[in-house]
Amino acid sequence: MPHSLNQVCFIIRRLVRVRKTRVALAMLWLTWLASYLFAGPARLVDYPQDYRKWVHVKSGLIGPQSPAYARYGGLHHIYANQRAMEGYSSGRFPDGSVIVFDLLETRDNSGATVEGARRFIDVMTKDAGQYPETGGWGFEEFKGDSSSERALSLEGRTACYSCHTAVKGHDFVFSAFRQ
């Protein structure tokens, strides 16, 4: 009997070691996966300080007749840093390119349409090393006048990229520089 009890104990110890190894490997894999999918601040797009001093690419007004009005209604301005201006010329935006979509409410001032409060800014930053899964672009949205209040979840950033795939031939950028 002690011999078979020893065998049973050996088998139990062996199973426990195998399970611990499997659990450890599974935890290691899950940690890697979580760090890849939910990478921290290094993967987030920075707020573009002083972007209104950059090159003004173009402006547009989206009125109530537009199907995009609920989300994008108002006056928008697009700004680009110098690296992005290289991309507007060549059609390929180099790393370091930053494009800002600045959306403002509009209001009537005695028959003149004028800028109101800022609704949000959308920012695209090109860094092929940081954002390989989204064509090299990082996407972010900042609420109102805040330089820190982010509006996009991981799903929101993915949705931005999905929409921008419609212009993949122009390096995922909708706007064109108006000379």
Image: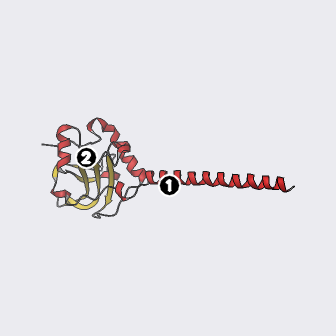
* Image side of residue 12 versus residue 160, left or right: right
Q: In this view, does 14 lie above or below 49?
A: above
Which quadrant of the figure has residue 6?
bottom right
Q: Is disc 1 surrounded by few (<14), some (14 to 19) or many (20+) residues within 10 Å?
A: few
- Which is closer to the viewer, label 1 or label 2? 1
In this view, the residue in front, 25 or 61, is 25
In this view, the residue in front, 69 or 159, is 159
Tag 1's secondary structure?
helix
Which residue matches tag 2?
A: 95
Let me know if residue 46 appears in the view. yes
Give the image location of residue 93, x and y in percent: 23, 42
Q: Which amino acid does label 1 sit on?
A: Thr
User: Tag 2 or tag 1, which sits nearer the N-term?
Assistant: 1
Tag 2's secondary structure?
loop
Which quadrant of the figure has residue 172?
top left
In this view, the residue in front, 147 or 163, is 147
